[in-house]
Image (cartoon, rainbow, N blue to C red):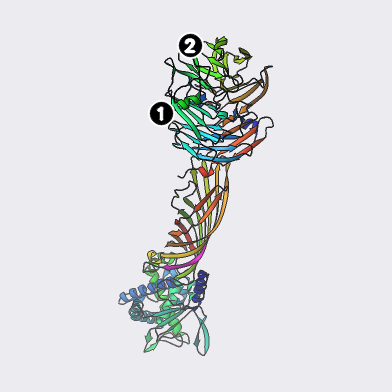
Amino acid sequence: MRLLVFILGLILAQNAMASTFVGNGGNAGDIEMEITMGQAQKSLSIVEDNKDNASSSLCTCSSQFEGRPLCDVLKKLTSDQVRFCARFVSMKAGDLSRVLGEKGALSVSWTHDHIEVQEEGRLRGADAVTDPKRMTMTLNQKRFLEMDQNERLFLVSHELFHLTTYQGKTLSDEGELGPFKGADGGRNFINAMAAAVVMQASDYSIFSEYRAAEARSKSYKKTYLSVGYASMSTPNDSTTSFDVNRLAGAQFGVRYQLTPAFGVVGGLSLLSGDKTIMSTIKAKENRNMLSLGASYRFFPFANPLTGAGQSHLVLSATADLLNGQYQYDEQGLGGTAKMSSMGLTVGCNYFIPFDAGLWAYAGVSYSTLNYSYNLDNQVDLKYKDNGTAFALGVTYGF
Amino acid sequence: MDSKKLFALFGFIYCSVLVGCGVQFGSGADDRENFIGNLTKDVAALTTPDEGQAQNLVLFDKQVRRIHQFDLTAMKHVRSFGVRNPEIPHYVLYGNAGNYIVDLSEKGISVFNRYDQVNHNPIKLLGKPISAAFLPSKGLVIVYDDLASVGMLKVDSNGDVVKKWVGGAKIANGNTIAAGDLNSGGQLILALSDGSVVVADPEASMDAKDWKMAPGHTTPTVTGLSNITWLAPLPKTPSQVMIRSTEKISLLDLTSQTLVSSYSIVDTVSKMSKFNDPHVVMKSGNQVKVAYAESSQIKIMTFYINTDKLEVNYLLSTNLDLTKKTWSFVDTTQTLDYWFFNDLDAAKKDRRFVRYDFNQVLTTQKFNVADEAQVEIADDFIFALFPRALGYAVRYDINTERQSELARFNLKYIPAD
């Protein structure tokens, strides 16, 4: 009951928690945001580094993007607009890069709500909104995660340029700005600069630098399904030959992260072990263990963009329902016995990310085993020692 | 389960006069002559002439190295005893009336009484107990070891040892024991190294701690026989003894102290049996002769038997019941290097039970014996113990072919690993 209350508490607490990007990879989209920020910073740094001799190539379409919407943004530009765009990007790239590199300079937060901004007296839907005064950026998490990496970098870059000023005024999507005329001049200008950042990332292979991190399984996923192989050992009982000391078999598990740290876990272990007694008696035990409990997760390594940073330890405590069947046989002569019991398990599993949501895990657990089999009213086969289990498997997080 | 194929189906094989059915269990046992009673074995006789057919079977289970006692009527496991030095061979005798068990091994003798109390080593024999003469109705146990010592026990109706003594093999006139057995009167008849025969009184010997002859038998009977290797008192005529010597099968009358009948052996002696009525089986080609004593005569019955693949099938056990007029034997096509004395389990494959109407020389029953099972035979049924660590035995009623199983009786005795 206490366990159930604890689990319910975690579920309720989850709804009260804010979804703020804090850069530790624990929330959905955090990794993607880290990647996008990194891509933006590197692209802007390159622009900064090359501002004296490469500005002419800025705000033009790269061949890799030929025919794609991002190119359309740039192809519409006049030569004045290209020069203006390139000069402005070159001028602001250093500042933005430093903002991105400075911890805490920019606050990014997620929202699950639809974002609308007021433009020319009416509301317009948006994927993100930036407050230059507070240096905050708010993004629609769902939309962000639906985007590809080009679109994400474009969006973030667009928002970053809202932090910049032209002639003492922060850039706005509304109104004319320099050679960008018309009511949407500001938007077109910012879009052109954002597209330019994407082109830079592409031209300088910045995207490929993050390919591994992008593809790597991400720990912010909430649900994890596992299948593995487990082997449980118990100490030899010196008072009987019938105890089966090692059982192994399939292990199925599910974990739902209520928060980045806390979750609920369930599992089913189908273990089987056999033993030969006195050379001729074949003893076999099937032990099924249904588990339900809570888990605590922590990340031993810092950088969430690395495999080590994504790897994590999950400590769990579960209540177990055990069902078992014991069979012994000697050339057709033998019998069976059944048992049902409750137990407790504490365990620790280490999850290592693969790609595409897959993880490998290895773990150890310690279970209380307190049950007995009655063999033909002659032998009371008692299991009273605890079992130590080792497990290996794969997990899919989604 | 086809009982005819799976189980040994023997006719009744009475144990020989006064003794536990007697040979060592399993092939490779000592093939020896010159012993007292019958060779020891790890299953007690189901039938003794003085107590009749027992409904309890006692055996030393080689799987769990314990002694078990079974009630064959209810087909249940009655009790079990751990033994000292379980790793070595153990042999058992069972007294039905006193419900006691005598456990014999090279390292000692133990007697378990009816109250499950054990008396370890009431006597100490330094040799291996190779044979025993057993008369449960009088509580007499005579154990003979391979160093020629003779141990004697007198057991009361509860199975408690009340008398005991260990004597040497030298009996009279400097002669030593060649062979012997108890007769139904409780006298220990011993053939000596000079061919003479003496009749000892076991209880008096135990009282005196010295060999004492039975009243009326103070002097040895000179037989004129040489190298007596086997001696068998007749169960219904305790004053007569069938003797096998080098060249003869003779019948000695202890009252008159004369050989009343003799037969000169011309064939190969293949089996000497005390099962029920003592007899000697001789073979020559497909001619089988059974020598037995009846009406103070050594008589010969000749059988012409098709012996299948081998020139001579090897006899494992032979049983002659002159009261029921039957002769039964178990043979095998397996090659044995052990063949003088009855041992149903000297070979555990290709065994066959055959029973004859001895008057008509008419085959009345023929069955195959289950491979691998240890068997013991009573008048009406056989008991087959299969080599299962968990314990599995079957009682098979010969006449009705009904079978009763006893399973997993070793379960709680499986030793811890």
* Mark 1 residue element: loop
Q: Is residue A302 magenta?
A: no
Residue B143 position in % (x across, y down):
48, 27
* Along the viewing direction, whichever of B192 and A355 lies nearer the viewer: B192
Q: Mark 2 sits on what residue?
A: B226
Q: Position of residue A182 (x, y in %)?
A: 47, 87
Residue type beneath disc 2: Ser
Give the Cα separation between the discs numbered 2 and 1: 29 Å
| Dots 2, 1 in contact, CB < 8 A | no
| The one of A3 and B106 positioned closer to us in this rendering | B106
Mark 2 falls within which chain? Answer: B
A350 or A121, which is in the foreground? A350
Which amino acid, by three-letter code, is at mark 1?
Answer: Leu
Q: Is residue B154 left or right of residue A199?
A: right
Q: Which mark is residue B126?
A: 1
Q: Secondary structure at mark 2?
A: loop
Residue B169: x %, y % from top left: 43, 21
Q: What chain letter is assigned to the residue under label 1?
A: B
Image: B134 above or below A267? above
Which residue is painted at 38% across and 72% down in the image?
A38
